[in-house]
Amino acid sequence: MLEKLYLSDLEPGQLYKSREYLVTAEEIKTFAQQFDPQPFHLDEEAAKSTFFQGLSASGWHTGAITMRLLVDSLPIAGGLIGAGLEDFRWLKPVRPNDTLWVESEILSCRVSQSKPHQGLVKLRHKTLNQLGEPIQSFISTIVVPQKPGVQKALSPESCPTP
């Protein structure tokens, strides 16, 4: 288990890479049956004549896989608590047998003025396939606690805002 990360552990420019995750045709169909029942997510034959020209994972499924990989690779104390999402894009379809991984870069961080026991960290995330092709990207802002007993204010130089 990875050591929990607090605000003072994070700096702009830090990169985090997740483990890899293999996507199967069966799980694409299972997710789609419950949450996004469209032909290009449910049936190989029907998918051939669609925009995607073959079976592809729902973008929401890709997002859920990404979230799982983020939870595993960014062990923020208290969990990944979202405070905002920007520029969410699906760039390429996810196919059966694609292997996905996520790269996250810290863009900025700051101590909350109204709640100095926590701060806000902005990250850029890219979900990539086995060829290193980006298939999804977005920017998130998360709430990150200060380390217990540490109410150290981070200077603007060490944690600039964009």
Image: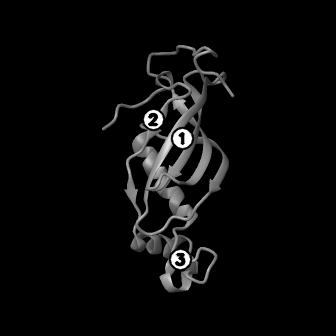
- Badge number at residue 54: 3
Residue type at numbered disc 2: Ile
- Label 2, secondary structure: give it: loop
> Which structural element holds mark 1?
strand
Quadrant assignment, res 49: bottom right
**Number of the label disc, if any, that sits on residue 121:** none
Q: Residue at x 48, y 34 (%)?
A: 15
- Residue at mark 2: 76
Q: Is residue 83 above or below residue 114?
A: below
- Label 2 and label 3: CA atoms lie apart by 37 Å
Crowding at label 3, few (<14), some or many (≥20) Cα neighbours within 10 Å? some
Mark 2 vs 1: CB contact within 8 A: yes
Q: CA distance from mark 3 to mark 1?
A: 35 Å
Amino acid type shown at disc 1: Ile
Residue drawn at (62%, 80%) of the image: 50
Compared with residue 144, is residue 86 higher up or lower down, i.e. above or below? below
Q: State the residue position of label 1.
A: 81
Closer to the chain start, of discs 2 and 1, is 2
Percent across and percent down for residue 142 are 57, 37
Instruction: Residue 61 in the image: state x and y as whole percent.
Output: 51, 63
Residue 103, position in %: x, y?
49, 43
Task: Identify the residue at horizontal 59%, vertical 50% (top origin).
Answer: 137
Quick one: SS at disc 3?
Answer: loop
Q: Amino acid at mark 3?
A: Gly
When the figure is inspected, residue 135 is found, relative to residue 47, above or below; the finding is above
**Viewer-nearest residue: 65 or 118:** 65
Q: Earlier in the sequence, mark 2 or mark 3?
A: 3
- Which mark lies nearer to you, 2 or 3? 3
Disc nearer the start of the sequence (3/1) = 3
- For the N terminus, the image quarter is top left
- Quadrant the C terminus occupies: top right
